[in-house]
Image (cartoon, rainbow, N blue to C red):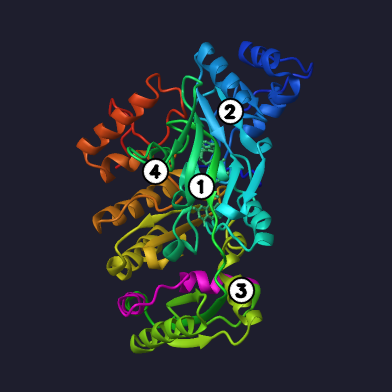
């Protein structure tokens, strides 16, 4: 992932690198002694590269460990605990909520060398170390007629550990589920450096670890469920004169019995950004564009489902275009996959929001967010996994001209819209540091206290990824009004 300096959080000032190549602090020296210099980055110039994720810069770590095994992780965790410093797990740092950017100087454990991956076709399972790149699982399973369905758009770079840390989703999640749905077992190292292998039975502690953003334990390996890919896929694109009609069509199609494999929405601003970039002939005048795949192993059912979606779109006043070939289908999906680079041409940076609201509320939510964007003067673009009501309003900005305060203020207002409509702060990108200030408004005090109890039970000293997810118990970190 390309590091992007953001004005949103400058983090600690960058000190000047030392040039003698020796560890410049006691923790780095101790880890180098225990693990050897090949597995420890101790020079400041190296450590500076581990301050950020895809959205935020944080504090410079005192040391970075590149473990190759669970035993290395145990050694690193114990050394950090002995030194009394915090520990942050890090995958590809493609996260969009500040999760892998350290809030305080301490130890970063970067899992990118833990890439052992084995496929067990007879059990339809994979065993993956935390640093395995998401797409690599499907690439290795495909010769056995199997795939790993979780498909975050970042799947060429993101890691299994990071995906489970965030419980990542993707276009396929409406029908096939999110990352956590594919975990059969996982191994993690707790805050004391003890190793646990968890299966998914009573108390489902593995489920608790999934989506905990590295605040409850460090995932070192996982057993993942694989499935055969659907034999047939049919694609259609529908365009609508208003967002309400699009949401209505989606609800009607689902109510009629369609369970599309993919169900993606782009608003007018988003469609135009992609069309300016790719010139695919997308409908520029449409207020909402819907991209749908129906899929399965029985062609008749797949086509029946497409017909249900098509009928619902037409009844809601939409215009439908069926993809007549695999090439046309690929071109339509290229539109959705190209949203990120297309937006990058409009402004150098963006804050990628990630709210979930009831699908019935989507028309009002999209309208309100658009009005907020217009009033703020920011270019705001909306797209998302409409089947789940998971919307990604993106605030595009130029940090040279627009203030971080104003971007945060708009992000806060967007979060408040989601909460007001009975939604939640995050569908798949996590809370991290970005949404932490809004947690008190989103989660009631009794539930927050229960979450703190869980955190204290698993990490009594607060060593694991402090400053993330849960707001400060003292109440000193309220969101700005
Ligand atoms: C262009 C782009 C598109 C994206 N599209 C999607 C999308 O479609 N769907 C989606 O869900 N997300 C998406 N994301 C966000 C991001 O890619 C996901 O959150 C992804 O799961 C992060 O994986 P990572 O390996 O980069 O983790 P990191 O960013 O390194 O870490 C993410 C979090 O997990 C924790 N963590 C990392 N490794 C471990 C471990 N081994 N044990 C415990 N905790 C750990 C970190 O501390 C951090 O809190 C996108 C990001 C970008 C930049």
**Front of the two marks 4 and 3:** 4
Marked residue nearer the N-terminal end (1 or 3): 1
Label 1 to label 2, Cα distance in Å? Answer: 18 Å
**Front of the two marks 4 and 2:** 2
| Residue at numbered disc 4 | 435
- Residue 176, given in percent of the width and then of the height, sits at 46, 62
Q: Decide if residue 54 is on the left or right side of residue 471.
A: right
- Residue furthest left in the image: 446
Badge 3 marks a residue whose secondary structure is helix
Label 4 to label 3, Cα distance in Å? Answer: 32 Å
Inspect this view and state whether residue 382 appears: no
Marked residue nearer the N-terminal end (1 or 4): 1
Marked residue nearer the N-terminal end (2 or 3): 2
Q: CB at mark 1 closer than 8 A to ligand 1? A: yes
Determine crowd level at label 1: few under 14, some 14-19, many 20+ residues with C-alpha closer than 10 A.
Answer: many
Q: Decide if residue 53 is on the left or right side of residue 390.
A: right
**Front of the two marks 1 and 2:** 2
Label 2 to label 3, Cα distance in Å? Answer: 40 Å
The structure residue drawn at horizontal position 56% and vertical position 58%, both measured from the top left corner, is: 153
- Residue 410, given in percent of the width and then of the height, sits at 39, 52
| Residue at numbered disc 2 | 108
> What is the magenta range?
249-277
């Amino acid at each position: 992932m390309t590091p992007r300096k953001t004005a949103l959080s400058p983090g600690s000032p960058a000190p000047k690198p030392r040039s003698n190549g020796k560890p410049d602090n006691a923790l780095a020296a101790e880890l180098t002694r225990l693990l050897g210099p090949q597995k420890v980055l101790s020079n400041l110039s190296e450590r500076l590269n581990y301050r950020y994720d895809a959205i935020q810069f944080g504090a410079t770590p005192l040391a970075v460990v590149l473990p190759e095994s669970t035993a290395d992780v145990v050694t690193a965790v114990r050394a950090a605990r002995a030194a009394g410093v915090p520990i942050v797990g890090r995958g590809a740092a493609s996260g969009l909520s500040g999760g892998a950017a350290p809030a305080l100087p301490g130890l970063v454990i970067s899992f990118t060398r833990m890439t052992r991956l084995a496929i067990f076709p007879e059990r339809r399972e994979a065993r993956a170390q935390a640093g395995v790149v998401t797409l690599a699982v499907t690439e290795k399973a495909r010769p056995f007629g199997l795939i790993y369905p979780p498909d975050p758009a970042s799947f060429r770079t993101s890691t299994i550990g990071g995906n489970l840390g965030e419980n990542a989703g993707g276009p396929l999640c409406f029908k096939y589920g999110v990352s956590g749905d594919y975990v059969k077992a996982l191994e993690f190292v707790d805050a004391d450096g003890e190793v646990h292998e968890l299966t998914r039975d009573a108390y489902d502690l593995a489920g608790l670890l999934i989506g905990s953003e590295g605040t409850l334990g460090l995932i070192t390996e996982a057993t993942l469920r694989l499935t055969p890919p659907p034999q047939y896929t049919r694609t259609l694109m529908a365009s609508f004169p208003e967002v309400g009609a699009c949401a209505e069509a989606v609800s009607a199609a689902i109510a009629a019995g369609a369970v599309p494999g993919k169900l993606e929405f782009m608003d007018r601003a988003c469609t135009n950004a992609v069309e300016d970039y790719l010139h695919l002939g997308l409908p520029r005048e449409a207020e909402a564009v819907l991209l749908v795949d129906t899929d399965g192993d029985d062609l008749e059912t797949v086509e029946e489902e497409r017909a249900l979606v098509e009928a619902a779109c037409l009844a809601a006043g939409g215009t439908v275009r069926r993809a007549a070939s695999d090439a046309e289908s690929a071109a339509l999906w290229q539109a959705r996959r190209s949203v990120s680079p297309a937006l990058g041409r409009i402004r150098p940076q963006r804050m990628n929001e990630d709210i979930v609201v009831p699908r019935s509320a989507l028309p009002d939510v999209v309208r309100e967010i658009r009005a907020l964007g217009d009033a703020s003067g920011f270019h705001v673009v909306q797209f998302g996994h409409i089947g789940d009501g998971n919307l990604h309003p993106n605030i595009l900005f130029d940090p040279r001209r627009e203030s971080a305060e104003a971007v945060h203020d708009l992000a806060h207002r967007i979060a408040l819209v989601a909460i007001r409509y009975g939604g939640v702060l995050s569908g798949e990108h996590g809370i991290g540091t970005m949404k932490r200030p809004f947690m008190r408004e989103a989660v009631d005090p009794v539930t927050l206290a229960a979450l703190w109890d869980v955190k204290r039970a698993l990490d009594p000293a607060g060593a694991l990824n402090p400053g993330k997810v849960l707001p400060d118990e003292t109440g000193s970190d309220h969101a700005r009004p």
